[in-house]
Image (cartoon, rainbow, N blue to C red):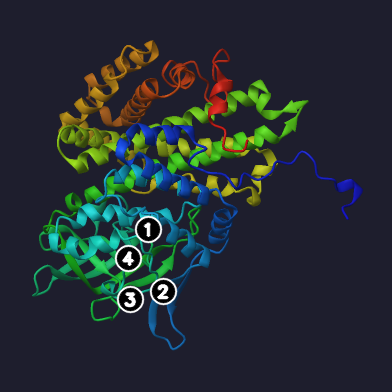
């Protein structure tokens, strides 16, 4: 019997038992917009099933358990034999198994694969983000492997399989396999040309022995890894299997697991190679060019993943404000709280819309034919710009959403601290903000067709909103003089991303969403914190659109 002084009232029910996909209007409308009509019913059914799973109590429990019980390294067995294994909580395997089983590593060979995969990645990230790391790298390894047709023929069916088979065994014995990546080293970080890992060729064609270290090797229990090392001809890409064809374990010494701010369910390791067998992927000296398609694909997943974290943050904040009463009424009806929630919802919808547009461009490129070259050029500039901006917006959105829950959001049980800890990851992974900004400059200076493609995209909305038109003019002024541009690269990339987001929302979002975005992000009628939108806007409609199911 509860004590009379401890009657619980005015507490918000958990956001559980809902369809993460169907409750998200920006997501569902984007999938409908970009899907081929013949695929839409199948895609919608697939994402609805995943959305229900992601919003279930079971998946939420898996996510909590996988993060409360992070992976553990076992370097040796009881007899002193080196084994270099990582143990995971069973919840991790449930999460990863659902990711693979839903096809989140299978985009390159099925119609509309990139859009439906990106939407699925967006949905399942909201259940738990850490398992997305090996999923993303496995998906992204395919284009790099295709530079070696024999390797692609061997590995691609395993990487795109819908079967999750954990455990270290020869890949040939497994129906499905996962890939990781090892690019950075402690002396160079993002400057991979400073890598010192050596690759010594063997007599057999394409075979080498690697010796060196990797400072961040993601998901060390994967079946294979794409790594960079210095061959006689220069920096080269290699495939390193964990287990060799004869069943013996490759030399892959896990020195320690990283103790990370977030992403705690997933293992990231420092590893040592010592005469480790590897197969060359691509030509010697062209390692960066070989692996760049993998990097581009994982950068898109950074955009999708950050957009997903923003969406879940906003959903939790709107849900809380719907059920929480304060100062004589529900929080969601208070003008100031409504302003905050609408501001957060704008950021979330802009990120979602841009992420899906990029995914649809990948499908066009994959299909070939009319428009493929233009979309390839569009992606060359739009992906690093989006990666820079969307991932940077994730942390302030998560922090403000947590504040909407007050003290209830500051405790672990709410799930909000996990979202906040996870939020900086994608801005660092696959190149931090400066790396992305410099990559945009490189594309501007070397690939004029990329800028032309982005400007054509932006131009689709020209004349529809005077604030967007003004922002486009300002962007063109910035681009007219690229002297000393490195020092203002972040400013330029921010403008580029905002104009691109604004153009997409003007074309596709409801008028109240586009109006609020253009007024604040492009028109300058905005403060420096969330909740500073012009009060004359239709903020109630923006918030209503962001409601999760059941609110």
Can residue 46 be seen here? The reply is yes
Question: Label 2: which residue?
Answer: 85
Q: Give whichever of discs 4 and 2 has the lower sequence position.
A: 2
Query: From the viewer's perspective, is residue 372 above or below residue 537?
Result: below
Q: Quadrant of the N terminus?
A: bottom right
Decide if residue 325 is on the left or right side of residue 546: right
Q: Which residue shows up at 36% across the image and 21% down it?
A: 507
Q: Give whichever of discs 3 and 2 has the lower sequence position.
A: 2
Question: Label 4: which residue?
Answer: 176
Nearest the eye: 375 or 224 = 375
Can residue 427 be seen here? The reply is no
C-alpha separation, residue under disc 3 versus residue under disc 2: 12 Å
Eye-nearest disc, 1 or 4: 4
Question: Label 3: which residue?
Answer: 169
Can you tell which quarter of the image residue 350 is in? top left
Which dot marks residue 134?
1
Eye-nearest disc, 3 or 2: 3
Label 4 crowd bin: few (<14), some (14–19), many (20+), radius 10 Å:
many
Q: Give whichever of discs 3 and 4 has the lower sequence position.
A: 3
Label 2 crowd bin: few (<14), some (14–19), many (20+), radius 10 Å:
some
At mark 1, the secondary structure is helix
Q: Where residue 492 sits: x, y (%)?
A: 32, 27
C-alpha separation, residue under disc 1 versus residue under disc 3: 17 Å
Eye-nearest disc, 2 or 1: 1
C-alpha separation, residue under disc 3 versus residue under disc 4: 11 Å
């Amino acid at each position: 019997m509860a004590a009379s002084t401890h009657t619980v009232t005015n507490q918000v029910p958990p956001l559980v038992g809902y369809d993460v996909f169907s409750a998200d209007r920006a997501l569902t409308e984007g999938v409908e917009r970009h899907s081929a009509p013949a695929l839409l019913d199948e895609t919608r059914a697939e994402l609805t099933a995943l959305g229900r799973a992601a919003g279930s109590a079971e998946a939420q429990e898996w996510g909590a358990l996988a993060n409360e019980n992070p992976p553990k390294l076992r370097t040796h067995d009881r007899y002193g034999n080196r084994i270099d294994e990582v143990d995971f909580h069973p919840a991790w395997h449930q999460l990863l198994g659902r990711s693979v089983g839903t096809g989140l590593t299978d985009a390159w060979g099925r119609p509309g694969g990139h859009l439906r995969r990106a939407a699925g990645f967006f949905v399942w990230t909201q259940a738990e983000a850490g398992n997305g790391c090996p999923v993303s790298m496995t998906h992204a390894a395919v284009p790099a492997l295709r530079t070696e047709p024999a390797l692609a023929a061997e590995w691609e069916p395993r990487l795109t399989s819908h079967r999750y088979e954990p455990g270290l065994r020869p890949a040939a014995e497994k129906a499905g396999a996962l890939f990781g990546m090892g690019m950075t080293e402690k002396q160079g970080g993002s400057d991979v040309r400073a890598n010192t890992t050596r690759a010594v060729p063997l007599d057999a064609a394409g075979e080498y022995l690697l010796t060196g270290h990797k400072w961040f090797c993601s998901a060390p229990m994967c079946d294979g890894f794409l790594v960079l090392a210095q061959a006689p001809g220069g920096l080269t890409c290699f495939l390193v299997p964990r287990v060799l064809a004869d069943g013996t374990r490759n030399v892959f010494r896990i020195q320690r697991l990283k103790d990370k701010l977030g992403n705690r369910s997933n293992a990231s390791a420092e590893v040592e190679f010592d005469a480790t067998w590897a197969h060359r992927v691509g030509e010697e000296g062209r390692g960066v060019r070989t692996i760049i398609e993998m990097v581009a694909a994982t950068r898109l997943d950074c955009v999708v993943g950050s957009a997903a974290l923003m969406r879940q943050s906003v959903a939790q904040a709107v849900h809380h404000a719907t059920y929480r009463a304060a100062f004589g009424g529900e929080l969601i009806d208070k003008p100031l709280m409504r302003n905050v929630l609408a501001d957060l919802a704008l950021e979330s919808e802009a990120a979602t819309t841009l992420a899906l547009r990029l995914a649809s461009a990948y499908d066009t490129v994959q299909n070939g034919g009319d428009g493929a070259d233009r979309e390839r050029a569009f992606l060359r500039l739009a992906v690093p710009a989006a990666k820079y901006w969307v991932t940077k917006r994730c942390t302030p959105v998560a922090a403000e959403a947590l504040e909407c829950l007050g003290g209830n959001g500051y405790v672990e049980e709410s799930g909000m601290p996990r979202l906040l800890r996870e939020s900086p990851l994608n801005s660092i992974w696959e190149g931090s903000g400066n790396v992305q900004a410099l990559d945009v400059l490189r594309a501007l200076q070397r690939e004029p067709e990329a800028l032309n493609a982005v400007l054509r995209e932006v131009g689709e909305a020209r004349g529809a909103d005077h604030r967007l038109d003004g922002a486009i003019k300002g962007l063109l002024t910035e681009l007219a003089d690229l002297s000393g541009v490195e020092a203002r690269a972040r400013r330029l990339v921010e403008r580029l991303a905002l104009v691109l987001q604004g153009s997409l929302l003007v074309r596709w979002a409801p008028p109240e969403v586009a109006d609020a975005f253009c007024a604040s992000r492009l028109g300058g009628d905005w403060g420096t914190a969330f909740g500073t939108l012009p009060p004359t806007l239709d903020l109630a409609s923006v918030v209503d659109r962001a409601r999760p199911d059941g609110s």
